Image (spheres, rainbow, N blue to C red):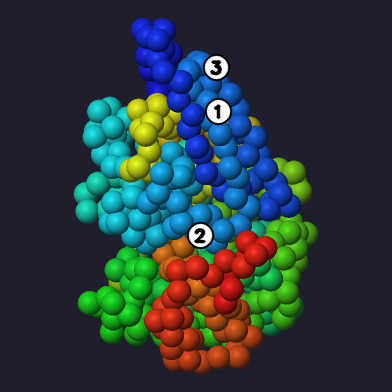
Amino acid sequence: MGHLNVHKEVEGNDKLKEARLKFLRFHCLDRHHCAVQYHHLVDGIIKRFEAANPHVKIESTIMRNWYQLMHILNKKLHTDETPDIFHTCGGGILEELSDAGLVYDLTHELDGGWRKDFVPASLQPLRFHGKDFAIPLEQGCIFVWYNKKIFKAFGFSVPKTFDDLLYICRELAKKGIVPFTVGNGERWPGAFFFSHLFHRIGGEEVFVSDFTKASNYDHIRNSFIAAASKLLELVDAGAFHKDCNTMDYYQQRMMLVEGKAAMQINGNRLLNYLLAEGPAIIDSLDIFSFPLVDGGRGKTTTLFGGSLATYAVSEKSGHKREAVQFLKCLTDRQAARDVIFNMGDIPALTHVPFSEYPSAVHARMAEELSMAENLQVHYFKYLPPHAAGVYLNIVAKLFEKEITPEEAFKTVEQALAARTGNNVNKSGGIEI
């Protein structure tokens, strides 16, 4: 209960020096309304913390572009202009920053009783070499969402293997029903398919920031090419609509809402959108984990996910004590309830029992997170910015069958070899 601790600390010391915390935040484009809501939610927590701690002022800088955020971190974390607190999605980029000594080690803070407030798997992408470098307020978890009525009409069971999934896609396509709706005009929805296939084939060990330097290079190469081949099998099975590479995320959601598609890969935040865009469809939907690939190393006990609100503290911050106290306020029971009841989302926190969640599917997703053995960040979040942009475009080409699996791997490999460290253009986009 970090917020209560903050109150006690202030009451015991009226002469605390003023501290101004620089808070580098990431809230993606306003058309994604869950990002707007998180913007407001975090604003509210800041006001609550400042009211309890009048000697602390938090100055927010908000990034709208992921690669621009990475550019600012690379430019400022090692300087006196460093943000005190910054957004991260964990994975390879956070590991690189922590290995460089730029991120404050939170292990001793968590071991002091704070750790019990978190779902264990949610901390896993933020831990390296036995040390914790960031904490999450909420946790996105990726599932295959499916229309139960369509599955029942065809007599389908939830697929346990990739071959089962291929069969379902072929049968649906024969009847003119779109198996998967994908808004890959934004590139990341298509990458969800590749990440799952890459993992189910190669396991967790294939997710590294630069495979050209990896000791298991051959395994990563083989797994990448196999994943690309499996994605092409889905294309050949008629799993996707023809315009998937130009459709946007809103159109992706609406195809499911309108019953025009049987499935989509999406996170728990889809529930938030559906409450506003298509509440009538919710009772017809259920979820399952992306199935296993025969002979693969990955297990379904690994969930993919990311966070709209995960934060770390700079090692060069001059206000680490205040920064940690703010993070404790950011992850207290009131914050957890705000995530559930105001956002319709899942906190990375254990404060609220499943029985108190507002719907069965909401509680079920939270319970799935609690039982996960591992939480995996998507592959493009591991790669450095230039290579990530190349990779996302390569996946789009696979959807169009414009590139072979071997060519796809080679192109990403060349991008990794050519990384420059600064690919942000004047408008904040990534040069690829």
Q: Give the amino acid type for the residue marked by disc 1 in the picture.
A: Ile
Location of residue 329 by image quarter: top left
Residue 50 image offset from top left, x and y in percent: 53, 21
Indicate whether 248 appears above or below 215. above
Q: Mark 1 points at which residue?
A: 46
Which mark is drawn over residue 51? 3
Task: Specify the amino acid type for callout 2.
Answer: His
Q: Residue at x 36, y 80 (%)?
A: 223
Please tell me which residue lies in front, 74 or 195. Answer: 74
User: Of label 1 and label 2, which has the lower sequence position?
Assistant: 1
Q: Please, what secondary structure does the residue beneath circle 1 have? A: helix
Q: Can residue 361 be seen in this view?
A: no
Tell which of 197 and 3 is nearer to you.
3
Residue 412 pos. (x, y %): 46, 81
Question: Residue shown at 24%/34% (left/top)?
Answer: 108
Q: In the image, is 296 to the left or to the right of 180?
A: left
Distance between mark 3 and mark 2 Cα atoms:
32 Å
| Earlier sequence position, callout 1 versus callout 3 | 1
Q: Which of marks 1 and 2 is in front?
A: 2
Neighbor class of circle 2 (other Cα within 10 Å; few <14, some 14-19, many 20+) is: some
Q: In this view, does 150 lie above or below 351?
A: below
Q: Mark 2 points at which residue?
A: 71
Q: Is residue 387 visible?
A: yes
Could you say where residue 139 lies in the image, as x and y percent from the top left?
48, 46
Q: In which quarter of the image is the N terminus?
A: top left
Disc 1 crowd, CA 10 A, few/some/many (<14, 14-19, 20+): some
Check disc 2 and report its element: helix, strand or loop: helix
